[in-house]
Amino acid sequence: MEAIKIRGLKQNNLKNISLDIPKNKIVVFTGVSGSGKSSIVFDTIAAESQRQMNETYSAWVRGRLPKYEKPYVESIENLNPSVIIDQSRLGGNARSTVGTISDMYSALRLLFSRIGKPSIGPASYFSFNNPNGMCPTCAGIGKIMDFDVHNIIDEEKSFDEGCFLLPAFGPGKYYWKVYRKPEYFRTDVKWKDLSEKEQNFLLYGSYTVDGERVDKKVEGVYKQFKRLVLMKGPEEQNDYTL
Ligand SMILES: [Zn+2]
């Protein structure tokens, strides 16, 4: 089997190295830091392969491609075109995936929309970045931030005594007044002794976790805290204090 033959390699700190690298095999370069792994892989094989390939393009295209120095080597034979995947972080954001960065994602969406069974419609429905396709729970990010609501409740206190450990819910404060609805829950009963219905009203604004809003002013402490603090990015969080 033919191999990539490198002769007289003096790139960087390499001292006249000659080696054959088998093709169609997974080849791993290992060694201590500074031993020359990157000099062989990136600065020699990848650089020369890219350089040779770039020479086949027009001057206009070449001017827009990265420049590769000719490696300091006597000869390299049987080189293939190379794909360089280095260790640097890819740009992008939380919505970037291998699919979006490589653009395979668009082709896959199209594929699924054309031949997927059962069919759910246009390609955009297969996108986690599109409201039609994204998971409603995580908005397509793939992870959610949540908090344990018990950490902001003093179960031994009633609402009137300030059972919610958030400044704006302290006795007499703004949200304490908004949420103080004696018609929906007993304001003078310790949190731990309230019924589930009463607790749900205070946490979710409804008698069940996903139920209808009972009072249009009461969103529920859990929902409100989540919306105002957790659903925003860190840079936006400081402009609102509960
Ligand atoms: Zn999700």
Image (cartoon, rainbow, N blue to C red):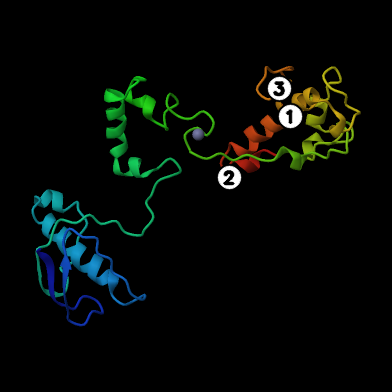
- Observer-nearest of 57 and 153: 153
170 relative to 135 in the view: left or right? right
Image position, residue 208 (x, y; %)? 71, 22
Quadrant showing the C terminus: top right
What amino acid is at disc 3? Answer: Thr
Image position, residue 124 (x, y; %)? 36, 26
Q: Which residue is mark 1?
A: 203
What amino acid is at disc 1? Answer: Leu
Q: Which residue is mark 3?
A: 208
For disc 2, the neighbor class at 10 Å (few under 14, some 14 to 19, many from 20) is few
Give me the residue at 12% from left, 66% from top: 3
Residue 148 vs 181, above or below: the answer is below
Of tags 1 and 3, which is closer to the observer?
3
Lower position in the chain sequence, tag 3 or tag 2: 3
**Disc 3 vs disc 2: Cβ atoms closer than 8 Å?**
no
State which quadrant residue 37 falls in. Answer: bottom left
Q: Residue 51 got which mark?
A: none
State which quadrant residue 44 falls in. Answer: bottom left
Say whether residue 176 is visible: yes
Of tags 3 and 2, which is closer to the observer?
3
Lower position in the chain sequence, tag 1 or tag 3: 1
84 relative to 174 in the view: left or right? left
Of tags 1 and 2, which is closer to the observer?
1
